[in-house]
Amino acid sequence: MTASHAPRGAGTTAVHAWLLLLPAFVLLVAFTHYPAVATLIDSFHSTPKGNRPAVWVGLENYQVMLEDPVFWKALRNNAWFAIVTIPASIALALLMALWVNERIAGRAFLRMAYFTPTVLPMVAVANIWLFFYTPQYGLLEQVRGALGLPAQNWLGDPATALGAVTAVAVWKEAGFFMIFYLAALQSLNPSLREAAAIEGASRWAFFWRVQWPLLMPTTLFVMVNAVINAVRMVDHIVVLTRGGPDNASTLLLYHLYEVGFKFWDSGYAAAITMVLLALLAATALFQFFFLDRKVHYK
């Protein structure tokens, strides 16, 4: 090929590359960037009603949010929900992965059983647990009655409602995270276990000194997904408690759903959405720029 043909070939390659990227780029802009910018603009406008269009109100929606006790209740509930579900689901997933990675009888059945909750829709999972939590007739109440314990309304008591929906989320997520840990464990060099056995290292020492450091990149990936899931879960709240009793189980996304689709206050809902996006962005930046430096084992 002559030198005069080189620029034309390079240009054609660049055009082909951009054409290949165009579908993904259009989808990304249409369903991610444009909605985020539009929501930011809507958060500074009032809610249009009937023939009255939206008008610029500045920070009024954010001021309403700061004075809304339900918002602060939902924020505290979501913080507690995240603090419990993230480490609990990750720890349970790691334990299950370590177990089914060993040569044990029925290993394939255990893997399938652990992963089954993941493939179920969250609405179906919530309905299953709704049967467990039903007062007087539910499975938990049957067990408590057989043990002579007093009846407990798990979803109707403000002291237990949030914990009950948290248990459902952990049960649903742990099997999904287990798959990533299991894949990471199977990718480790088997000679590491043999070398540790020759050195006389215990199983705990081998896990803590060898396996756990090598699993840190997987843990970071799982943690990012766990944080996102802790904020975006709302369907099991709708089925189990609808945020009650007395907003005891209301999470941020459910509060956003109520404001936007029950009270039709799109301006205030946009303001809550921006706070939600800001929290997720701050968490993601912390995880990738601070924790990412500590996950690579050498």
Image (cartoon, helix red, strand yellow):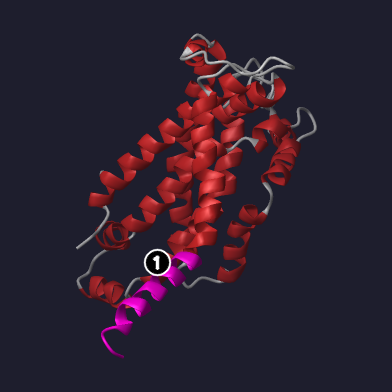
Q: Nearer the viewer, residue 10 or 150?
A: 10
Q: Nearer the viewer, residue 152 or 276?
A: 276
Q: Amino acid at mark 1?
A: Leu
- The percent position of residue 96, horizontal first and vertical second, equals 49, 57
Magenta-highlighted residues: 1-20
Q: Nearer the viewer, residue 100 or 213?
A: 213
Question: In the rendered image, which quarter is residue 129 located in?
Answer: top right
Q: Is residue 256 magenta?
A: no
- The percent position of residue 117, horizontal first and vertical second, equals 64, 52
> Which residue bears the numbered disc 1?
185
The quadrant of the rendering that contains the N terminus is bottom left
Q: Is residue 17 magenta?
A: yes
Mark 1 is surrounded, within 10 Å at the Cα level, by few (under 14), some (14 to 19) or many (20 or more) other residues, namely: many
- The percent position of residue 6, horizontal first and vertical second, equals 30, 81
Residue at image location 48% in from the left, 53% down from the top = 93
- The percent position of residue 86, horizontal first and vertical second, equals 45, 41
Work out whether 212 lies above or below 107: above
